[in-house]
Amino acid sequence: RYRLAGDGSVKRDGFVDDGDSRSRVVKRIGKQLAKSNLWAWNDLRKRYARDADIDLFVGIVKASDRAIREKFPGCRFHVLLWRDGQGDERFEKTLRGLRGAGLRVHKIDDILPGSVADPQQYDLSRYDSHPNARANDLIAEYVARKILVND
């Protein structure tokens, strides 16, 4: 678990499952409510990234960049940014945040032709949206041609 400190840095704040002291009864009620379509729709709305989530994400990536450069001097840190289905506004805010932090960002949209209009063409299957072999080949080609050669 991480949190964004007042100075914009990222601080470790325990573990993801810390503080889950809910009683067995509350957990059982939650499991039953999770079966409801209405409850699931409401829960889905909460999953969308808020501005604070995006700021935390940018802070974590920025801290990762700093850690890599400290451990491996001369190494260059690049970010391959995927759309996550949360809408153009969130994607653009994340992109601006990462670039504003001085990070080198490459949009997957620019690497995988037609991925905005038809992202499923690069999925393993309609049930698994991880990148397929074609997507991996195109990304590897891009990294070799645009990142490794230019660094």
Image (cartoon, rainbow, N blue to C red):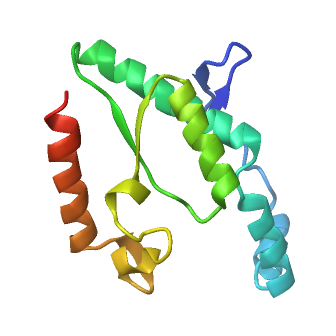
Where is residue 78? Give x, y as percent: 34, 35
Residue 150 appears in the figure: yes
- Picture quadrant of residue 132: bottom left
Which sits in the foreground, 66 or 24? 66
Q: Measured along the vertical axis of the image, is residue 47 above or below residue 129?
A: above
Query: In percent of the image, x 72 and y 58: which residue is there?
Result: 48
Where is residue 125? Give x, y as percent: 37, 85
- Picture quadrant of residue 9: top right
Q: Measured along the vertical axis of the image, is residue 151 above or below residue 106?
A: above
- Picture quadrant of residue 133: bottom left
Horizontal arrangement in the rendering, residue 75 relative to residue 13 (left or right)? left
Where is residue 111? Give x, y as percent: 33, 57
Query: In percent of the image, x 80 and y 71: which residue is there?
Result: 30
Which sits in the foreground, 133 or 114? 114
Q: Measured along the vertical axis of the image, is residue 15 above or below residue 33?
A: above
Query: In percent of the image, x 84 and y 71: which residue is there?
Result: 42
Horizontal arrangement in the rendering, residue 56 relative to residue 80 (left or right)? right
Where is residue 90? Give x, y as percent: 67, 51
Q: Measured along the vertical axis of the image, is residue 85 above or below residue 13?
A: below
Which sits in the foreground, 118 or 11? 118
